[in-house]
Amino acid sequence: MKYENAIEPTQEQIAATLGSAEGPIYMVNLLKYREKAEYPDGRETSLTGREAYDLYGAGVVETLADVGGSVVFGGEVTGLLLGEVEDLWDDVAIAMYPSGQAMIEMFMSEKYQAIHVHREAGLAGQLNIATRLKGALAEIAAQK
């Protein structure tokens, strides 16, 4: 299995994710940070990539809440139990968006646009895996 970290999705990836069935989207984020933050505007900084991304992450918690979403999980990758990859990601985060439309609203908001620069500065790359609850898990979630 080949994988390639990226910073931004392609238009095709956005359309495929947002064009699928309605309902909540649980986005699994596999994050790889730069050793030192690199801001697109060239500003000097002493921040590490993780520190810059943490600024972004704090703002994402707020912008997700604004559209009815939430951070479901966030944690540091500590090892690989099964399988093999050349280089592990640094962190994993799971965000819940109530719908594809909510995701678009968040990305287009002024608040999100203001914090996005920290994401770009901090990330070396990432994988985003869009998931949806199904079967028994969806039924349990619907009861909450």
Image (cartoon, rainbow, N blue to C red):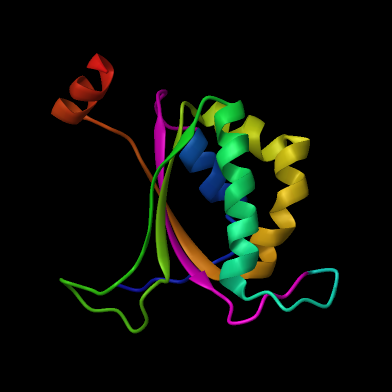
Q: Residue at x 58, y 82 (%)?
A: 35
Q: Residue at x 60, y 62 (%)?
A: 53
Q: Residue at x 69, y 60 (%)?
A: 118
In this picture, is 34 found above or below 7? Answer: below
Image quarter hosting the C terminus: top left
Counting labels gives 0
Q: Position of residue 16 (x, y in %)?
A: 48, 41
Q: Position of residue 116 (x, y in %)?
A: 70, 53
In this picture, is 120 found above or below 101? Answer: below
Q: Position of residue 77 (x, y in %)?
A: 34, 68
Q: Which residues are magenta?
A: 19-39
Q: Residue at x 74, y 58 (%)?
A: 117
Left or right: residue 49 versus residue 128 is: right
Q: Quadrant of residue 112?
A: top right
Q: Quadrant of residue 139?
A: top left
Left or right: residue 56 versus residue 134 is: right
In this picture, is 105 found above or below 49? Answer: above
Which one is in front, 79 or 58? 58
Left or right: residue 19 versus residue 113 is: left
Left or right: residue 32 versus residue 46 is: left
Decide whether residue 102 is among the magenta residues. no
Q: Position of residue 43 (x, y in %)?
A: 85, 73
Q: Quadrant of residue 29?
A: bottom left
User: Would residue 123 be seen by someone viewing this image from the given angle?
Assistant: no
Decide whether residue 35 is among the magenta residues. yes
Image quarter hosting the N terminus: bottom left
User: Would residue 26 be seen by someone viewing this image from the given angle?
Assistant: yes
